[in-house]
Amino acid sequence: MPEGPTVRRFCSLVSPFVGQQVVKVGGRTKQIVLPDLMEKWIQDCQVHGKNLYVAFGCGVTPKATSVNAQEFDGEKSHEEKIGIDCPPNTETTTSPNNLSSLENEEHPRCKWLRFHFGLYGSVKVNELTHAKRGDKRGDWKDPVPRLILHFAAGSFLVFYNCRILWCSSPYVEPTCDILSVEFDKEKALRALSAPRPVCITLMDQQHFSGVGNIIKNEILFLAQVHPLSLGSLLPPETLRALIDHAVSFTAKWLRIKMQGEPMHYIIYMKEYCPKGHKVVKETIGPPHGLQRLTWSCPTCQERAQPEGHTQEQI
């Protein structure tokens, strides 16, 4: 599914429509009643972790929202571009990087739609997605939108492959959001120090909201940590380095997303690591939970072992 930087890119596509009225609704979703959106005004757009939230109300709100591509200029470091480890600018409009300051009373007459995107989830503006190849039967079928919102002058927003649910307000816990200015590194360190594989902790959205499988693979290699190493066996300085890589890599990915450039991975889906070692691909996940493909270099990422013991496989 799309990870934090991608969902924030989606937010930058939706935010220009804040203050516009829905004049027509389409799509195949059955999770909401489509006519409920007719003649509603988009009042806000926010992001938390991997979820996109869009507020709908019966009137126009003057409040501007949401980070946009113009804020990502080339004059600042990628941490500064999204405010990571930098003091928030209270003179700017509210952005999805500072969710804790957003209270529902700012939009007392609105309701929020939460979008949680699947593996091929996306948001399109004024265009539809077309099939790039045929299915197993050789049929070329275009993806069917889950939701289409039409606005005046013929503009429209299209949402693909996502779960859509109404909620009273966005779920806000910025201390665990990897792209939030309030991300709590000490809290993250305590979570990573648990006696379980670090690759599983990194995918736990309660501690690392916005981190997905790509980020997990990349930062584990950058920190030279084996995915199955138990956090309790790793020194604090190694875990801190892993957290720093998580913050910097995710910020860099967001910057590249906003600039419309492709991301070049180091270990994800690679056969060899940058040093030429053969990469191992295996499926790893929590017991009775989602198993995800994981790429690692057994030479560069040596697995931490307890003294005098053989570490259990999960």
Image (tube, grey):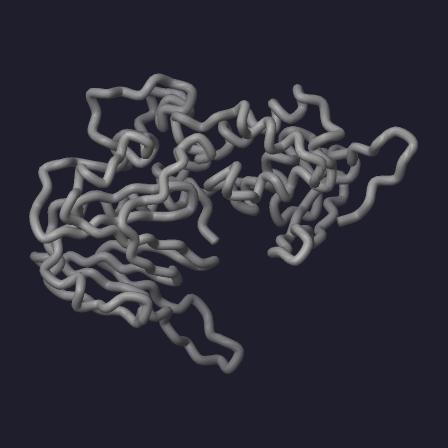
Residue shown at the point (34%, 70%) measured from the top left: 144
**Would residue 261 be visible to someone looking at this image?**
no
Residue shown at the point (75%, 33%) measured from the top left: 300
Q: Is residue 243 above or below residue 292?
A: above
Choose top left, top right, bottom left or bottom right for residue 273. Answer: top right
**Left or right: 68, with 1 as reference point:** left
Residue shown at the point (25%, 51%) measured from the top left: 112
Q: Position of residue 32 (x, y in %)?
A: 28, 66
How many numbered marks, from 0 up? 0
Q: Nearer the viewer, residue 291 or 156?
A: 291
Q: Position of residue 301 (x, y in %)?
A: 74, 34
Q: Is residue 152 above or below residue 218?
A: below
**Left or right: 111, with 198 as reference point:** left
Q: Is residue 34 above or below residue 44?
A: below
**Left or right: 214, with 28 as reference point:** right
Q: Nearer the viewer, residue 114 or 262?
A: 114
Q: Position of residue 189 (x, y in %)?
A: 59, 27
Q: Give the residue at the far bottom of this rendering.
A: 137
Residue shown at the point (25%, 44%) measured from the top left: 45
